[in-house]
């Protein structure tokens, strides 16, 4: 009977050598976890805000699930964490006050995309793993599991992800099978009592980190009546269809941050307005008209606009830079509106996560920070020196940084470059420290 290996010292070199894609391991009582309850709650409340904004749109996809006694809830709003709860503990008290003895599970996928604090700490933590094994091209996933449910709603299953579980609150049990315990042609099993003898378990408590490879069947269980909270990070290992790469390219093609603002406004893709349900799609006789409906014509013309070789090359460069600066966790949190930067403001960049810069052609360049990108026109040489100064990590005054741009530099003015810095501040790739002389 296999057993979980337990250790108390977490370090990446030993982890990669002994456990990475080999066998599960439980780190007990380590302080290495990047997740804190406040950041997790902030991201969960942000996911609720995003869900409520899209609930009236035509996009029915959701990153949130809520079950009561194993039953999926259709109307989620009453059961979701919101900013007014103030904390995960207060959210838990509100839900338990309504449910009484009934059990619940809250599951939020892509958790990092709704909370910058959580995303930035997670990226920093896993950057050490990427240095040793390489960054996953399609990005990792992050899922919040919270509740007093009996076991994971999906039951025993196999993921295409090698997984880290970070325990925040309560006790949880993970049960594992080195190979599929059943012979029936099904991918998951809810009633797995007949297979318990072939399994082994790991019990996690707050502060623990549990890892298991993608080859292990598993299920999460409650280890008591109390509510448990954990964050799982899955790193893809298998079943990465080619269609994902095509989707990446198309999403990058229609991402306005891959183009300058003026270029985006000038593409027909930004101006598509017709509805595919518009009148006139069908002829009076019933069959489709030999001419494409207006909405499809506009879409084809729009994609033709942005798929010319030069534009496609720019998009691919922007997608790649965004992927690198996202650090393996996409989609990244949305940008803020950058504040006005005055000449006396002091700014700096975290040298661990520099702003990446590439020249596109003789007249254009791209920069990227925190998973966002800008395409601009102007002198790449002067801009390269500016980013080299910023990426050193030293404080610098905005006025000093913009000194080379007092006169128009190959199409780039001082105001143009200030606007770029303000956009990077909105990406949170550039930190404003205050005003006065740089230290």
Image: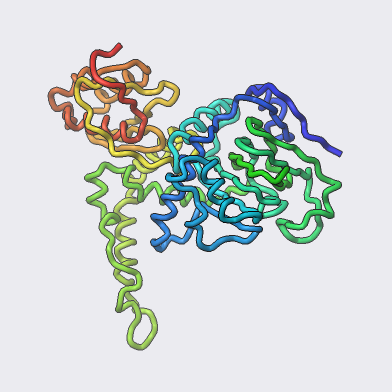
Task: Give how far across and how far down residue 413 sits, in percent.
Answer: 16, 29
Task: Give how far across and how far down residue 210 sits, in percent.
Answer: 68, 34
* Furthest residue toward top: 439
Quadrant position of residue 381: top left
* Furthest residue toward bottom: 285
Q: Residue at x 60, y 30 (%)?
A: 133
Q: Nearer the viewer, residue 152 or 94?
A: 94
Q: Residue at x 48, y 33 (%)?
A: 327
Q: In the image, is residue 398 above or below residue 372?
A: above
How many discs appear?
0
Task: Give how far across and how far down residue 239 sits, in percent.
Answer: 62, 49
Q: In the image, is residue 129 above or below residue 305?
A: above
207 vs 387, left or right, is right
Task: Give how far across and how far down residue 134 sits, in percent.
Answer: 56, 31
Q: Nearer the viewer, residue 275 or 283?
A: 275
Q: Residue at x 69, y 25 (%)?
A: 17
Q: Nearer the viewer, residue 166 or 394?
A: 166
Locate the N terminus by quadrant: top right
Q: Residue at x 66, y 54 (%)?
A: 101
């Amino acid at each position: 009977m296999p057993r979980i290996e337990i250790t108390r010292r977490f370090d990446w070199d030993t982890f990669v050598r002994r456990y990475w894609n080999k066998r599960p391991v439980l780190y007990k009582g380590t302080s290495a976890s990047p997740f804190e309850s406040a950041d997790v709650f902030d991201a969960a409340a942000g996911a609720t805000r995003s869900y409520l904004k899209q609930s009236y749109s035509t996009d029915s996809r959701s990153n949130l699930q809520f079950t009561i006694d194993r039953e999926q809830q259709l109307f989620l709003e009453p059961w979701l964490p919101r900013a007014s709860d103030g904390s995960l503990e207060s959210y838990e008290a509100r839900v338990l006050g309504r449910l009484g003895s009934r059990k619940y599970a809250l599951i939020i996928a892509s958790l990092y995309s709704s909370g910058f604090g959580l995303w930035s700490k997670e990226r920093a933590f896993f950057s050490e793993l990427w240095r040793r094994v390489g960054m996953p091209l399609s990005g990792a996933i992050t899922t919040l599991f919270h509740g007093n449910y009996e076991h994971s709603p999906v039951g025993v299953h196999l993921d295409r992800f090698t997984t880290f579980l970070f325990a925040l609150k309560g006790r949880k049990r993970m049960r594992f099978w080195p190979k599929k315990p059943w012979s029936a042609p099904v991918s998951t099993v809810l009633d797995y009592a007949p297979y318990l003898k072939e399994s082994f378990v790991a019990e996690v408590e707050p502060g623990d980190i549990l890892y298991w490879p993608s080859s292990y069947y598993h299920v999460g269980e409650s280890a008591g009546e109390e509510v448990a909270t954990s964050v799982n990070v899955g790193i893809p290992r298998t079943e990465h269809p080619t269609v994902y790469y095509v989707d990446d390219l198309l999403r990058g093609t229609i991402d306005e941050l891959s183009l300058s603002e003026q270029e985006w406004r000038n593409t027909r893709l930004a101006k598509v307005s017709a509805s595919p349900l518009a009148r006139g799609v069908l002829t009076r006789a019933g069959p489709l008209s030999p001419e494409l409906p207006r909405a499809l014509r506009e879409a084809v013309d729009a994609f033709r606009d942005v798929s010319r070789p030069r534009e496609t090359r720019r998009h691919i460069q922007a997608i790649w830079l965004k992927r690198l600066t996202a650090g393996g966790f996409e989609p990244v949190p949305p940008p803020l509106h950058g504040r006005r930067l005055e000449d006396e403001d002091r700014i700096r960049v975290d040298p661990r996560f520099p702003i990446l810069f590439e020249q596109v052609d003789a007249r254009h360049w791209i920069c990227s920070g925190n998973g966002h990108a800008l395409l601009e026109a102007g002198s790449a040489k002067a801009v390269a020196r500016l980013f080299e100064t910023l990426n050193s990590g030293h404080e610098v005054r905005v006025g000093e940084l913009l000194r080379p741009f007092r006169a128009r530099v190959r199409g780039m003015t001082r105001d143009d470059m200030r606007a770029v810095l303000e956009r990077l501040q909105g990406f949170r790739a550039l930190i404003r420290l205050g005003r006065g002389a740089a230290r």
